[in-house]
Each structure stands twice: as C-alpha cells, then as structure tokens.
Image: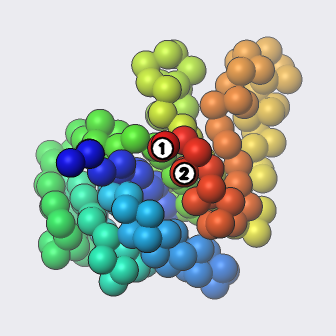
Amino acid sequence: MPIQPSVCVFCGSRPGDNPAFAEAAEALGYALADNGWRLVYGAGDVGLMGLVARATQYAGGQTFGVIPEHLLRAEVGKRDLSQFIVTENMHERKKVMFMNSDAIVVLPGGAGSLDEFFEVLTWRQLGLHAKPILLLDTEGFWQPLVGLVDHVIAHGFADASLRDFVHVVQDVPALTAALRAALS
C-alpha cells in the first residue's frame, strides 16, 4: 500500500475579517480528503485551523495535528483527529509538522503563520529540503508578502531563486492542481 501524501497547512487561529478566508479553508479541507491527502496542521479547533480540520474530517480525510502544551487551551486542541500530538514548545511543533509532510500550504494568518512560512522558506533557501511551498492568495491577502520577498531580492539580500521557492495560487482549484503536480 502506497504511503499517503501529507500536506502541511499553516493558517490563522482566527477566522480573519473576510468570509472568503473561511470558504477557502473549508474548500481546502474537502480537497485534501477528496484527493487522499492527509492534513498536517497545528491541531487547533479555532479559526481557519479548525475549519480546515473539520472539513477534512467531514469529507472522510485523515488528520494529523500537532500542538504545543501551552496552546492546548487557547487553540482548543482538537483531540478527535486521526493523530494528535502534544509537543513541549513551538519549535518542536513546527519540526514535527514539517517532518510529517510532503508539501506546505499557507493560508491567511497572522504572526504565527508568517513565522512558519519564513522558517520553511529559509530551510528551502539553504537547501535543507525541496518540498513545495504554496501560498493560497485568497483575494490578494498575500500580495504584501510577495512584494516584501521581491523587495528583499531587489535590494540584494537574497538571490532571485528565493522567489522560485514560493508558488502563489489564487484559489483552491489552482492550489489542488499545483499539489497534484507536486505530489504525483
């Protein structure tokens, strides 16, 4: 039996101010299950995290959640996942999520999502992995981030190849197609 591909999803523990963010999170959850991909995420049952997980579960998909002990209460640790792991700290959480995934998807989110994005991007830049990194740019949410990456490159603080490590997609159908290509 082939190993099930796993997609790490970094996203907000809040829903954000645009209903399109929640719609995209739910659509991603259904797409993961429909394609037989396991969701790897931060194990919260709040915000976009909770929406992705519940949609994946509802559609019959596998879920792998990783949460640090200190966030169990704040992020409402979702214990009914296929796999639920509690770590000592945030660093261990990110490591476990990354090591148990084949691709990384970043939905809208805050400082935590940015931290996770920049860590996997830095590891990719350093040649520590070749996993695809995809930004789901729902209604242009990530355009300032894309502009920042371009700004860093334009001012000589990174090689132009840095931009090649990030694939920006506008919607869940495009994201699903990119994941299919990357995971096949």
Q: Position of residue 102 (x, y in %)?
A: 40, 41
* Residue appearing at x 26%, y 45% in the figure: 3
Q: Mark 1 points at which residue?
A: 183
Q: Position of residue 100 (x, y in %)?
A: 28, 42
Crowding around mark 2 (Cα neighbors within 10 Å: few <14, some 14 to 19, many 20+) is: few
Regarding residue 14, the answer to whether it shows in the image is no
Q: Is residue 6 above or below residue 160?
A: below
Choose top left, top right, bottom left or bottom right for residue 174: bottom right
Choose top left, top right, bottom left or bottom right for residue 79: bottom left
**Distance Cα–Cα, label 1 vs label 2:** 5 Å
Q: At label 1, which amino acid type do we have?
A: Leu
Q: Do the residues labelled 1 and 2 touch (CB within 8 Å)?
A: yes
* Residue appearing at x 66%, y 79% in the figure: 20
Observer-nearest of 131 and 140: 131
Q: Name the residue under label 2.
A: 180
Q: In this view, does 32 lie to the left or right of 21?
A: left
Q: At label 2, which amino acid type do we have?
A: Arg
Q: In this view, does 85 lie to the left or right of 93?
A: left
